[in-house]
Image: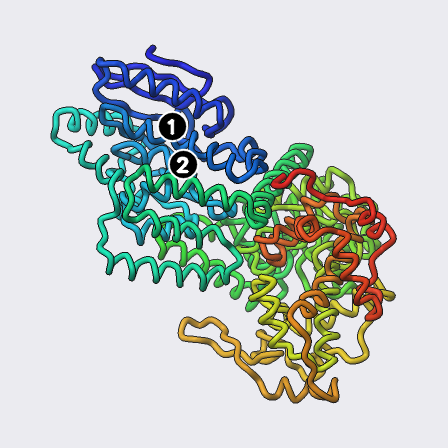
Amino acid sequence: MIFQSDSFVVSFIKDQIAEFKFTVPGSVNKLSQQTLNDCLEAIKELRQRDDIKGMVFTSDKDHFIVGADIFEFLPTFQRPEQELVSWIKNATDVFDALEDLPFPTISAINGMALGGGCEWVLATDFRVGSSKAKIGLPETKLGIMPGFGGTVRLPRIIGADNAMTWITTGQENRANDALKVGALDAVVADDALVDACINMLEQAIAGKLDWQKRRATKQAPLKMNKVEQGMSFAMAEGMVMGKTKGHYPAPVLAVKTIKEAANMSRDEAMAVENANFAKLAKTNEAAALTGIFLNDQFIKGKAKKQAKGSSVSINQAAVLGAGIMGGGIAYQSAYKGTPIVMKDINQDALDLGMGEAAKLLGKKVKRGHMNMDKMVGVLGKIKPTLNDADVQSADIVVEAVVENPKVKKAVLSDLEKTLGDNAVLTSNTSTIRIDELATALEKPEKFCGMHFFNPVPKMPLVEVIRGEKTSEDTVNAVVDYALKLGKSPIVVNDCPGFFVNRVLFPYFAGFSKMVSEGISFAKIDKVMENVFGWPMGPAYLLDVVGIDTAFHCTGVMAEGFPERMARQEKDPVAVFAEAKRYGQKNGKGFYSYAPDRRGRLKKSHDDEALKLLSTLSDSEKDVDKQEMIDRCMVPMINEVLLCLQENIIASPQEADMALVYGIGFPPFRGGVFRYLDQVGLANFVATADKYAHLGAIYQVSDQTRQWAEQGRVFYQVEGQ
């Protein structure tokens, strides 16, 4: 034994070659402040020894190092900026000391090496990965940037262009992809990893591999002339600004950091990284994005606990309805390993559903993420059928037929009679109350809602809707199945629209009222996309959802909440629905649509839409950008607050994640409650009061007003 701490063990693995094995307590290796401090002490001692000629870094777990311990480091971000600079420099000193060891070093990457884990391996002279290795720097996804030398070393190892792509996208890179750009020196079989590293170290010790030259390259300025630098950085800055629209400062500043440090030595460059990391750590965007990360951990932890409480073993699933949603559910279930029966009354629908599944799997094969044998195996887990009897053995059934309460009740009632005593029955309704559907059932305790979002393979959220008579065991079983599908389930209580759609339709109502006053829907879309940050504006989103679907849902919401959500007299959605302009599904709505060269629907201006909307208002009207934002967002935020107050949603964390994962609420704003903390609840109430004359959806509740007077915040510590 050469050195030991709670986080690692250093010992000889072969003559004069030492192994530095990470053994951090817990299921994964993370870099904590204590781990870094211990590493620095170990490195100081290792420098003094003359019996070590080379060192290999390994892990005792399935992954190398998954990153820094964000739960520990986040409170540090509360410090003043200058203190943060000193703190991050102390951390980077550890990585510099690692890089400066007086003998060759190599990393044996057996799984994920992400964030600080990636920066650790970049500080070693060589890197070998197993076939399962993934490396990357995902910090920009948290609103920060690499802070342990990633912006300094990575460009010098794989080139500035590749490094800027890795860092600004935060992508995880598979072993072979990392090998192609030079981030790895070799990829070997899992069981050959350590031996391959020892062999490479022996070559370096023998002088056959020039480890000192490699090290010198990382510590010198980038090997790019001024012309190359000008072109590379200008292109990167343009691409990043085009993708982020200025809402995400981290990738922008990461590029500027690499640019500023391009002609500097390692130590000078590291000082630039330290300063810019500290700036980002103090931004609202970093608080929002790290908040999303923590909220994601919160909802996953809660869901896993609920799933463990289930007494139902889900080995066989079924979905009724092979439409877009039903087919997506069948694909997702089979792909994640749970066999599923896809039942429909129409053979053409079944063929369409199977064809869609085959197309999705074919894309994975084409990209090299799956082989043909696995594709065939996944398709074999979907059983398309016209026969009711094939559903009888299912442990869980998802009803996904037409959004009509009479039809759904009839289907659910018939189905219940054929299922086993322990089977769980769910409905993929998007607005119809679970309690209403449950009136058709003899065992309402075995029934709840399971609301998927379209397209199912891409959308992470599943709303699990608890009815008045739904048992906890049923809820737990459905949460368990959602986790098996790779989804993020959030349990909500029953009401029209549940949580996500209930808060979405007041947003649409605020938009519709502006359009009926003569305000350009295209201008509103641009503001809500480019200024507030939604992935698509309300008009575009209505076209994607389907104008006919939105019109139907508006009726359901009006019936459920007649005071706040009654149909408007002059409603653009109603006008388009009557004119059979249903949006993307038939190529015309607020915009017209036609396939581009890739087959994707592209929107364009439509004079007919403007002509129809002109019947709602006598003249055009213009308002400033902030009013457009306020008039769309105040109704949504009010409804979100009401949902918390009425216990429809259990916590701010779950509400924010449902909005981000379900409808694309701008991640850099962190969700409604994070947004309210940043603007101040009292300021929001004052804004809402400006528009209170427009109707009930703009009027805050007494509870909200009381919270504002009390100075209520929803996240007590920034970033938590």
The answer to whether residue 336 is left or right of residue 189 is right
Q: Residues within 10 Å of mark 2 (few under 14, many from 20)?
A: many
Q: What colour scheme was applied to this rendering of the protein?
A: rainbow
Task: Give 225 or 129, whichever is nearer the viewer.
Answer: 225
Q: Residue furthest front?
A: 82
Q: Position of residue 300 (x, y in %)?
A: 61, 39
Q: Residue at x 39, y 59 (%)?
A: 237
Helix, strand or loop at label 1? It is: helix
Quadrant placement of the N terminus? top left
Say if residue 315 shows up in the picture: no
User: On the image, numbered disc 1 is attached to which residue?
Assistant: 94
Res. 148 mark: 2
Q: Amino acid at mark 2?
A: Phe
Say if residue 284 shows up in the picture: yes
Q: CA distance from mark 2 to mark 1?
A: 9 Å
Q: Is residue 261 above or below residue 86?
A: below
Q: Position of residue 641 (x, y in %)?
A: 77, 52
Q: Earlier in the sequence, mark 2 or mark 1?
A: 1
Q: Amino acid at mark 1?
A: Val
Q: Is residue 122 above or below residue 400?
A: above
